[in-house]
Image (cartoon, rainbow, N blue to C red):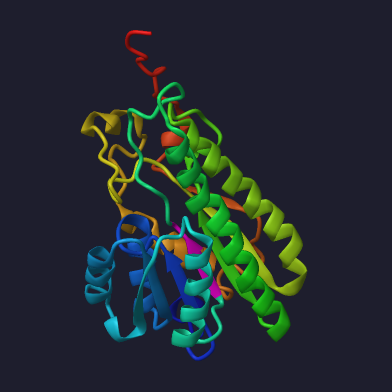
Amino acid sequence: MSLFNHPFDPAREAALVTGAGNGIGRAIAQALTGEGVRTVFADVNRDTVTAAVAASPRPKLAVPWVGDLAKSAACDALLADAQAAVGQVTHFVHSASPPRREADHALAVDTETWARMHAVNVDAGFHLARELARKLIAAHEPGSFLFLTSLHADTPRNLPHYSTAKAALAMLVRELAKTLGRHGIRVNALVPGAIAAGGFVADPALARHIPLGRLGQAQDLAPMALAVLSNRVSAYVTGAAIVVDGGLSLTNWFEPPDLGEL
């Protein structure tokens, strides 16, 4: 029997995916249900998450959840609701992130926008992962966590609130991987390049900077996400950052921002 025919154990595994209403989070959550995994689709937008559930390969395995993860009370509610809906969450994907605006460069981004970007990416990611890990450790169960970071955890993006949040997530992955590995919980990062999804609209001309010659799609991330999440396929992989960018990271195409009249 091929390992790749059964990457998950639906009888004992369940997943929670944040940012599952659109883009990469949606693609990964839908792919998990396609593998028979009961999956909580968490998102801030009711309409998009409802549509994501309805379009899943196996909608009966998808559980919608709506809330603002910038608020700690919402994170606690998500944890409680997820356990009530699917039982012990063994696979956690943190893809939620506020929209980016190109106007929010270093001299323009306001305090609220800065704080929200960090709250959803870093604070919520850490809180959810830690509490899920506590339950897995208490139950002596293995787990697999996956964080969506960015190429701009390492290279400037002219959006300092975004780049610094993703850089913090990249280190959080390493910290959690080191701490939780002895308990059978693997923690990894998926590092997307220019993915035309989730509110990001790229200039088609960007494709000339990509060795594979095209912008990425959210669906390009899902197969790799499943492979990294699977405790059967990637049993000896933790603390890794898997780049899925068509080769875009081989160059840095951004110019400094136009600051206008100062």
Residue 103 position (above or below residue 230): above
Q: Is residue 42 left or right of residue 57?
A: right
Identified at 68% across, 59% down, the residue is: 176
Res. 8 in view? no
Residue 178 versus residue 5 in the image, above or below = above
| Residue drawn at the location 51% of the way across and 78% of the way down | 3
- Taking the image as shown, residue 9 lies to the left or right of residue 110, namely right
Vertical comparison of 130 with 8: above or below: above
In the image shown, does 146 or 112 lie closer to the viewer? 112
Q: Residue at x 47, y 72 (%)?
A: 16
> Looking at the image, which is closer to me, 40 or 151?
40
Q: Residue furthest top?
A: 261
> Is the C terminus in the top left, top right, bottom left or bottom right quadrant?
top left
Q: For residue 11: magenta?
A: no
Q: Work out whether residue 38 can be spotted.
A: yes
Magenta residues, start to end: 91-95
Quarter location, residue 130: bottom right
Magenta stretch, main secondary structure, is: strand
* Vertical order, 261 against 69 (above or below): above
Q: Nearer the viewer, residue 242 or 103?
A: 103
Q: Position of residue 199 (x, y in %)?
A: 28, 47
- Residue 209, horizontal then vertical, whole percent: 34, 29
**Residue 139 screen position, x and y as percent:** 69, 85
Query: Where on the picture, by quarter, is residue 183?
Result: bottom right
